[in-house]
Image (cartoon, coloured by chain):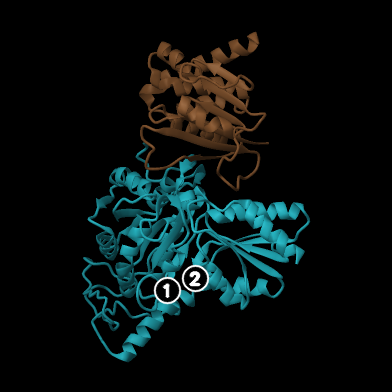
Chain colours: A cyan, B brown
Amino acid sequence: MSKQTVLTGQHFMHGDHACAEGALAAGCRFFGGYPITPSTEIAERLARRLPEVGGVFIQMEDELGSTAAVIGASAGGARAMTATSGPGFSLMMENLGLAVMMEIPCVLVNIQRGSPSTGLPTMAGQSDVMQARWGSHGDYAIVAYAPWSPQEMFDLTVLSFNTADRYRVPVLLMADEVVGHMVERVEIPATGEIPYWPRKRPIAPPNGRFLPFLAEDDDLVPPIAHAGEGYKLHFTGLTHDALGYPDMTATTHHDLVTRLKNKVRDNAKNIIRVDEYYLDDADIVVIAYGCTARSARRSVRLARQKGIRAGLLRPITLWPFPEERLKELAMTVDSFIVAEMNLGQIALEIERIIRGPVKGIFHAGGSMIAPEPILQAIEEANGV
Amino acid sequence: MRKEVRIAGFGGQGIGLAGYILGKALALYDGREAVMTQSYGPEARGGASSANIIVSDREIAYPFVQQPDILVAMSQEAYAKYYPTVRPDGLILIDSDLVTPKDVKGHYFIPATQLAEDCGRRIVANMVMLGYFCVVTNLVRRKAMEKAIDTTVKPKTRALNLKAFATGTEFGTRELSRS
């Protein structure tokens, strides 16, 4: 394998490998993880590739340790990530909350399989999408993306690192086994064309007074100083003041948790990404993400061939959810169909936003939802 | 144009590599859209193995092969399992050293393992089969396949793999001109 950092060019590439290459292209130089199907190929690839580019790969004792190691590496200034699937993702929830509270940028990849528990280790699922939003205790906000192709496994991994650094927030790449294990064309841009958003860094020198958790800017993101640079830093999961020291009062707690949530909410329009097909005049809108959106796109095309005005809204960011776009659509659209490989999770969010029922095409996981049942739902909605 | 191809055999025959090379040739060197998926399970080693490729002129939505237009069978088990899934007008390419067919309609035979041994190593039977595939199906340009082999296999095995591929194409050209 090439020892280049960025494998510029066209590849016929496995989704998990594209994720690993996206991480390297984004400048990730630390991976701490514990192998688990169907995410193992990410760890395998990075175990070989990271040492080639001067990075560090550690197989940790479990997913708690993996996440802790990633937080530590990032606090030291490295772009860092881990990758897992359902059972490992559950174990990561505790330290995900720690990363949120300490505002440590990091990327957690979940190649979703059939869940709950051990479920279907080698088969696809999309049933961790609400866990991504609410899995750790407390009020907080994270960013989560749902790739639908190996190309997006590359592109959205790069974006995950940039978003994490830009907002000092953990970013979750919520892929699924289908996208992780399929092989397709992936185009990797030239090194200079890989987007790179640097972390906001302190202006004051290390010897002066510096408040590492003071968010003075409108974006609510405090500049980040790295461990080892000379700044006096204190990181804790306890409620803390601008200096980073525990301050367990109701006022400080309310202000801190509100800012952590608003940091994502107020910047949502810059974070949110959607993909749209035939929405201009659509009466019927299918909403689907990840691998399911591939089938949904085909269903919508077939419906159009039959003269039905159907369209597709594909949320690329699951969290924050593209609420405003959906509200706009709800003003003109007659019916919404939600297809997802779980028993109705994102559908609940959509029903909340549009204040009405959706038609759900749900499957608990194990096999990808095919275009036919979605097309049938479109035809039924059209016949009403 | 949209075709579904399933290549099947047993673990260790390089089924996954053959599928990858075909997909790569189509997607990168032949101007097509192509996607590959593999049967994936805890039983993958030693047992049945398959690689599934869809090729199309436009973007491929659903990535799984449902009813192959072309089946390449390199073991009796794989043939028995997948022969019933082939479209009625489909093509079936078999390694005649390893598979006894139920029918001859739509069947194409090549002693791929024997020809690979003649090339030097039976491990390249998959490349012999790809060469034959190229001639019989006309689905992919020979140059595209050669480039995909060239950029995929380890440099020290490049010559052997290309020789095996050429052996398959020569066998195919000879057989087809006879019939």
Expressed as whole percent of the image width and height from the top left, the position of residue B11 reads 39, 31
Image vertical order of residue B156 relative to residue A58, above or below: above
Question: Contact, CB < 8 Å: mark 2 with mark 1?
Answer: yes
Expressed as whole percent of the image width and height from the top left, the position of residue A311 reads 68, 61
Does residue B22 appear to the left or right of B88 in the view shown?
left
Residue at 53% x, 66% y is: A344
* Residue at mark 2: A320
Residue farthest to the top?
A: B178
* Residue at mark 1: A141
Is residue A216 in view?
no
The quadrant in which residue B28 appears is: top right
Expressed as whole percent of the image width and height from the top left, the position of residue B121 reads 38, 17
Quarter of the image that includes the C terminus of chain A = bottom right
The quadrant in which residue A52 appears is: top left
Does residue A311 appear to the left or right of A318 in the view shown?
right
Which circle's residue, 2 or 1, is located before the other in the chain? 1
- For badge 2, the amino acid type reads Pro
- For badge 1, the amino acid type reads Ala
Crowdedness of circle 2 by 10 Å Cα count: few (<14), some, many (20+)?
Answer: many
